[in-house]
Image: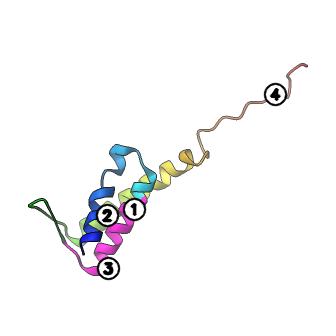
Amino acid sequence: MPEIAAAYLDSCTYFEDSSVAKARAFVSACTAMLARGIRRIEYEGAMLELDPNTLRALANDAKAYAAQHAAVESGGSGVIYPNFRDLRS
């Protein structure tokens, strides 16, 4: 399945790109590879072979990254709201 391999390769840089969307896409690609029993990816003459345990570990890492960084991207943790209660007019 070349589209799954392409999705894996496109999203595997989620950490370097600081992208929660790519991390989620990477999890989806790993899940699809596990479900279809895909263990090898060929790209431009190079071959990458991954065992199922490694794929699961990579997917879990990406899930953890997405969970940790999703709140910041959506305005969750890390947002400080000003308090104007004591402001004089």
Residue type (three-letter) at the residue carrying disc 1: Ala
Within 10 Å of disc 3 (Cα), the crowding (few <14, some 14-19, many 20+) is few
Of circles 3 and 2, which is in front?
2
Q: Which residue is mark 3?
A: 35
Instruction: Specify the farthest residue to the left.
Output: 45
Residue type (three-letter) at the residue carrying disc 4: Phe
Q: CA distance from mark 3 to mark 2?
A: 15 Å
Assign a secondary structure to mark 2.
Answer: helix
Residue range corresponding to the magenta coloring: 24-39
Within 10 Å of disc 2 (Cα), the crowding (few <14, some 14-19, many 20+) is some
At horizontal 52% and vertical 51% (from top left) the residue drawn is: 70
Q: CA distance from mark 1 to mark 2?
A: 7 Å
Q: CA distance from mark 3 to mark 4?
A: 53 Å
Q: Is residue 15 above or below residue 46?
A: above
Q: Is residue 75 above or below residue 84?
A: below
Instruction: Specify the farthest residue to the right.
Output: 89
Q: CA distance from mark 2 to mark 4?
A: 47 Å
Pick the front one: 72 or 43: 43
Q: Which residue is mark 2?
A: 7
Q: Which residue is mark 4?
A: 84
